[in-house]
Amino acid sequence: RALVDEGDPGDPLFLLRDGVVAVDVDGEVLAHLGPGAVRGERAVVEDGVRTSTVRAATRCRVAAVRGDHLDRDALLELRAGHRHEEVS
């Protein structure tokens, strides 16, 4: 089941507490992420839309935080360290 769909509004940010999610763009799986992964910082920082679909690959526990409850400078730093989804 999808946590978020590509093109959805970009708030909130998600922290994967347990489990594994699959990240896909245009239906192509680009990565599997595990506990500790943060998703959605790009959309929150840019006030944009989701750039990927994130689906539970296993049973998951996720924490969600609205963008207006986060430190924007910390999000920019986090975003700078992430690679962006690109389909080759």
Image (cartoon, rainbow, N blue to C red):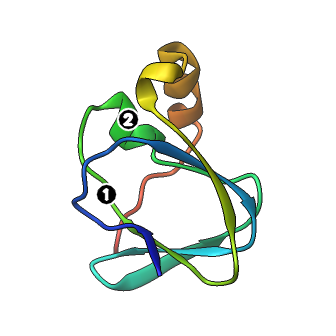
In the image, what residue occupies the spot 32% across and 85% down?
27
Image coordinates of residue 16 in percent, x first then y, are: 67, 57
Which residue corresponds to the image point at 46% horizontal and 82% vertical from the top-left?
29
- Number of marks in the rendered image: 2
Q: Nearer the viewer, residue 13 or 78?
A: 13
What amino acid is at disc 1?
A: Thr
> In the image, which disc is placed on residue 51?
1
- Label 2, on which residue? 44
Amino acid under disc 2: Val
Q: Residue at x 29, y 32 (%)?
A: 46
Q: Is residue 33 left or right of residue 49?
A: right
Instruction: Judge whether 81 appears above or below 38 on screen.
Output: above
Q: Quadrant of residue 56?
A: bottom right
SS of the residue at dot 1?
loop
Mark found first going from the N terminus, 1 or 2: 2
Q: Is residue 8 above or below residue 77?
A: below
Residue 24, image x and y in percent? 41, 75
Residue 75, position in %: x, y? 53, 26
Crowd tier of the residue under label 2, counting other residues whose Cα lies within 10 Å: few below 14, some 14–19, many 20 or above:
many
Q: For the residues carrying marks 1 and 2, which lies nearer the camera in this image?
A: 2
